[in-house]
Amino acid sequence: MLGVCFALFGLTGHRIAPLNEWNRNRYFVRACRNGDVRGLVKIIRETPAKEIDLNAGLGAAAARNHIHAMKTLLEYGATDIDTALVFAARYNHAQSVRWLTSPERGALAKRILSDDLRVAQEAACMTAAIETEWLLVQLLRDRKLQERDEAGDGDGDGDGDAFDLL
């Protein structure tokens, strides 16, 4: 019985499960999913870049609405903002969707195409994520109005009236 206690609490000085590539990724995704920024930063710093999937962590953090974790992952080089947007929309995390699509993301937010917003809106629709679906519909509408005003279509005033939508 005492040996079991020592093994469970790591008092023997041996690691219970060595940190190989599979365990590292598992612990990394778990840290992202739980919003453990210190834990994920530690794993990123200790692991060679090719052995860790930052984009999988970004999706896991988006699925649980951990904006600080998403911010950290983007700073370390995660790029798959489209998948993260779908995960956030699917689980009705309007704050994450708003954060991912905000102009503060700069080039990453501009890379999100209208098709990506539509896919995220469909994911929100299929899971009855009403708040997020509404937000994505508004983002799609705003993007469409902006594209029409830039192209010179509509009445050109960009005020969102019926003439701009036609």
Image: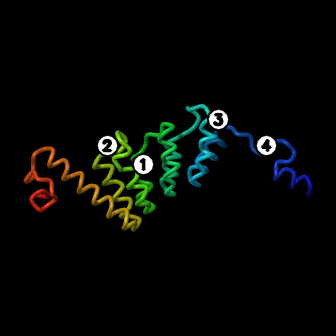
Residue that badge 1 annotates: 83
Residue that badge 4 annotates: 15
- Sequence order check: which comes first, mark 2 or mark 1? 1
Q: Position of residue 124 (x, y in %)?
A: 38, 61
SS for callout 1: helix
Give the residue displayed 49% in from the left and 57% down from the top: 65
Query: Which amino acid, by three-letter code, is at mark 3?
Result: Glu
SS for callout 4: loop
Q: Position of residue 106 (x, y in %)?
A: 35, 41
Q: Quadrant of the C terminus?
A: bottom left
| Closer to the eye: label 2 or 4 | 2
Indicate whether 114 appears above or below 75: below
Q: Residues at badges 2 and 4 in contact (C-beta under 8 Å)?
A: no
Q: Position of residue 134 (x, y in %)?
A: 32, 64
Residue that badge 3 annotates: 46
Q: Position of residue 4 (x, y in %)?
A: 87, 54
Query: Which amino acid, by three-letter code, is at mark 4?
Result: Arg
Indicate whether 53 appears above or below 98: above
Residue that badge 2 annotates: 110
Q: Residues at badges 2 and 3 in contact (C-beta under 8 Å)?
A: no
- 14 sits to left or right of 119: right
- Number of labels in the image equals 4
The answer for how far apart the CA atoms under marks 2 and 1 are is 15 Å
- Sequence order check: which comes first, mark 2 or mark 4? 4
